[in-house]
Amino acid sequence: MKNYLVLLLFLGIAMASFSCSDDNEDMTPAPAPNLYERLGGINAITAVVDQFLANVVADDVINARFAPTVADPFRTQLLRNNLIDQICAGSGGPCQYKGKNMLEAHQGMQITEVEFNALVADLIAALDQFNVPEQEKNDLLAILGPMKTDIVGQ
């Protein structure tokens, strides 16, 4: 009987210590999700990029710039994949952007401020279509915004 009571006491202490460690873990705040996760991951980014490209093709201000790309399925897919990778990587996701840097990619194109702003408006419209919250939209634009100097007027 004495051994039985000792065993019960031991089990009680063991269970209490496991229970306490679980409580401590629950009190530790989970790390805040990064922008990639807050955007919804790769599927959400892909959906936004697809809508963004559709917006660009329909945008009379800039669609002529993209006509050669749209006419070539390989180039269209390459642009799409690069945009997905760029947003995924820039927002903290697992993707790796393999395209050219923005200065190199836009060298000699002489893109105007009006064209750049139209492109940004097309992206914002795609984000709005998928109800991306304001904070995530602003965080994404803050990542992409500094690229403007490597795009406009080059």
Image: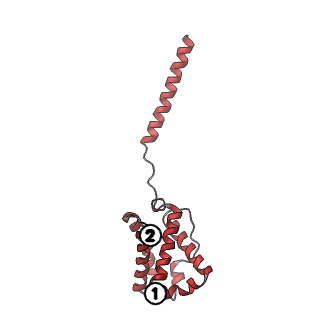
> Residue sitting at 50 percent across and 32 percent down?
18
Could you tell me which secondary element the residue under label 2 belongs to? Answer: helix
Q: Position of residue 40 (x, y in %)?
A: 48, 61
First in sequence, mark 2 or 1: give its number. 1
Task: Identify residue for label 1.
Answer: 111
**Above or below for 97 versus 1:** below
Q: Residue furthest top?
A: 1
Residue 58 vs residue 124, the one in the foreground: 58
**Above or below for 21 versus 119:** above
Q: In which quadrant is the N terminus drawn? A: top right
10 Å crowding of disc 2: few (<14), some (14-19), many (20+): few
> Residue sitting at 49 percent across and 24 percent down?
13
Could you tell me which secondary element the residue under label 1 belongs to? Answer: loop
One can see residue 142 in this view? no
> Residue sitting at 41 percent across and 81 percent down?
118
Task: Identify residue for label 2.
Answer: 143
One can see residue 46 in this view? yes
Going by the numbered disc 2, the residue's amino acid type is Ile
Task: Tell me the number on the disc at residue 66.
Answer: none
The Cα–Cα distance between marks 2 and 1, rounded to whole angstroms, is 20 Å
Going by the numbered disc 1, the residue's amino acid type is Ile
